[in-house]
Image (cartoon, helix red, strand yellow):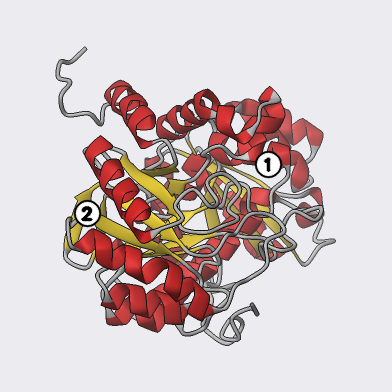
Amino acid sequence: MKGNPKIGKRKRQKYRIRLIDNRYSDHILKEMKAINVDPEGIQIMLPKSDGLVLKISSLKSAAANILKQQMLSIGGDCAVSRDTLTDSAASGDVLIMGDRRHYSILVQKLKRQKYFNLPELADEIERFISRFNGGKRFRCRGKVFDLSDRTLVMGILNVTPDSFSDGGKYDSVDSAVEAALKMEEEGADIVDIGGESTRPGSEPVPFEEELKRVIPVIEGIRKHSDVVISVDTYKSAVAEEALNRGANIVNDVSGFHFDPRMPEVVKKYDAGVILMHIKGTPKDMQKDPVYRHIIDEICEYLTESVDMAEECGINRENIVIDPGIGFGKKFEDNYLLIRYLREFKSLGYPVLVGPSRKSFIGNLLNLPVGERLEGTISAVCCAIMNGVDIVRVHDVKEVKKAVEVADAIVGKNTKIGGTL
């Protein structure tokens, strides 16, 4: 399970840009302190953060100072490090604050600059903002989901002896197929079949064993149903055989970072793909995972994943991203990821989360795996309020009902009409 050797050789984006969720003033304050903004400047700029706040990482000091001057000249602002202002640092992170009019003017001003690659920065800001409301469709082998209509429910079907929640529950092909068909009847849009446990501390299994577990189940489902099937694997050999037998989606917990052949397999079959973030491997991911800045690092990882996908020719509409709840995250990290889901949405792709029955719920409520339904539903509803597109769960029937109500509240559910 090695990292993808292509990383570092392919063309990277010159600038790393992401949205900062400005609904939480303490979040903006922490971001400003993290980039070493002057305390007096923080008090002046905080009231200006009610528009669109973008973070640009590792910008050269000269470019950052020009950016600040340009934003001030048009009525916006730009938070930069004290070291950047004094030229005592070669580069640093910046926060740009303004409304869409400010950004439109800024882009045109930067395109006329001749130095520090500022025209390229203008292009990337323009591209980022244009993609901000993207990710409304998900394509997978001819099937197209309109994600503006409703939140999709993905049912979890682990055909493993050792998964953390349902390991060994489906110990025959017939019982697994029956469970999949029941999930479809209960409202699952996608059934996600996994043949290798990725619980914390789990050991990898040979791909031959993984194939023996998942392929008969896929074939059995296809005899009775055309429900969309996802295969939960990071191995290209397993993914290809699953797609050959009728699967529609590859759910790769490594986000293309473990198997360099996976992108070409997804492209070959025009499959949908879920690119997830993981820190380390399932075996070691929970051994004291530490982040310098968790949202930045996950966004960078997922950006690398989608770069690999698009460079291989995979259509943008075939891609979903997943911040990886519970995969190399501390207890409190998982709550932050759901709180700031909008920042992942700003990358321009649909977002999936899988909070179902996980330990961040059990630890907070002091409950065993089998008693975490209410906590799961709460996490799902909060994720929908923050813009999630797909939720991956064990309890399809119960969660589906909650999703329909949450969708109605956020305006997705087309059964609900009326205006203010």
* Amino acid type of the residue tagged 1 in the rendering: Asp
Q: Which residue is mark 1?
A: 333
Q: Return the x and y of residue 21 as percentages of the image width and height.
A: 53, 37
Circle 1: element type = helix
Q: Return the x and y of residue 323 as percentages of the image width and height.
A: 54, 52
Q: Quadrant of residue 27?
A: top right
Residue 65 appears in the figure: yes
**Any mark on residue 93, and which?**
none
Q: CA distance from mark 1 to mark 2?
A: 33 Å
The residue at the point 80 percent across, 48 percent down is: 82
Task: Sort mark 1 into few (<14), some (14-19) or many (20+) by Cα contacts within 10 Å.
Answer: some
Q: Nearer the viewer, residue 192 or 306?
A: 192
Q: Is residue 78 above or below residue 383?
A: below
Q: Which residue is mark 2?
A: 227
The residue at the point 71 percent across, 25 percent down is: 366
Q: Nearer the viewer, residue 131 or 270?
A: 270
The residue at the point 71 percent across, 31 percent down is: 363
* Amino acid type of the residue tagged 2 in the rendering: Val
Q: Is residue 44 above or below residue 254?
A: above
| Residue farthest toward the top in the current orientation of the protein | 420
The residue at the point 43 percent across, 76 percent down is: 238
Q: Quadrant of the N terminus?
A: bottom right
Task: Sort mark 2 into few (<14), some (14-19) or many (20+) by Cα contacts within 10 Å.
Answer: some
